[in-house]
Image (spheres, grey):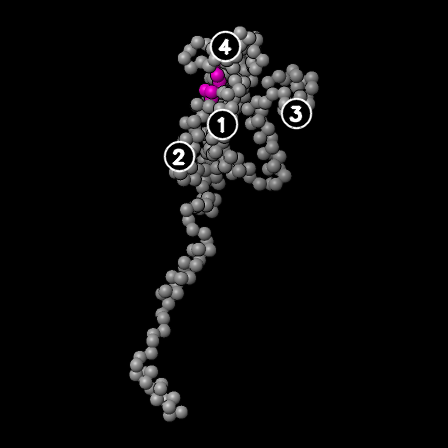
Amino acid sequence: YHPETVARDPLYLLKLWDGLSSFGGFVGAIVGAAIWKVVHRERFLPYAEMVASIFPLGWMFGRAGCSVAHDHPGRLSDAWFAVQYPAPVGFVGRFDLGLYEFLLTIPLAVTFLWLWNKGPRPWGFYLGVMCTAYAPVRFLLDFLRVPDDGGVLAADPRYGSLTPAQWASFGLAALGIALLRISKRPENQPTSSTYVDLDAPPAEEEAEEEEEHESDLAPQPSAPSKAARRRAREGARDA
């Protein structure tokens, strides 16, 4: 968000206590995933897909915290959906971007939960949908963000009249479209060996059931008749 500061002090990127950014977290996750892929020589898309499929639920809690902390202040407003922000004297009405993101993430989380119950999806599907859904929302919401000359500490700088998050939203949208295209490849389609049916009984139980079924079908020795038992007794007496 402040490239001039990073240019002066590259170690500023490691000062996590001096401000956090959601897009910074996304970039860090991508870099970490790339390093993990090189070290372990495995595909990270399936692992990232599992995280993305439940990510909106965690994002809801994160943005709920942002709305409570009021750390995403918007422009001054007296609209009915504005929030009373603390001011040097009393309170002022402002847009609360953290609250709006929290509310807008609920439909995405519910949709992902519904898709979970509808069966497996190709690798890259959830990541692609999440990126393409979040990018335009963040881009539009940042037009409501407090300007950097508004005298608010949490204000974001502008570059070409857009915030850094708005510029990053273009890349995020492109990434989402690319992931959706990747999800259509044959190697990313769901297979029976890729997904586990949690409702199916374990393999050990299936084997035991098959053995019991085979033993039930096997011919059982019949009980000796009365004549056979009598001949056996007579033979024993003669002996």
- Give above or below for 153 relative to 111: above
Q: What residue sits right under mark 4 in the picture?
A: 91
Q: What residue sits right under mark 1 in the picture?
A: 61
Q: Which of 189 and 16 is in front in this view?
A: 16
- Label 3 or label 1, whichever comes before in sequence order: 3
Q: Picture coordinates of residue 136 (x, y %)?
A: 46, 21
Q: Do the residues labelled 2 and 4 touch (CB within 8 Å)?
A: no
Q: Are marks 3 and 1 in contact (CB under 8 Å)?
A: no
Q: What residue sits right under mark 3 in the picture?
A: 14
Q: Are marks 4 and 3 in contact (CB under 8 Å)?
A: no
Q: Please indicate whether residue 156 sits to the left or right of residue 177 in the image.
A: right
The label nearer to you, 4 versus 3, is 4
Q: State which quarter of the image contains the N terminus.
A: top right
The label nearer to you, 4 versus 1, is 4
Q: Please indicate whether residue 166 sits to the left or right of residue 219 in the image.
A: right
Q: Distance between the residues labelled 2 and 4?
A: 41 Å
- Label 4 or label 3, whichever comes before in sequence order: 3
Q: Picture coordinates of residue 96 (x, y %)?
A: 48, 16
Q: Picture coordinates of residue 32 (x, y %)?
A: 60, 32
Please say whether residue 83 is one of the residues in the magenta stretch: no
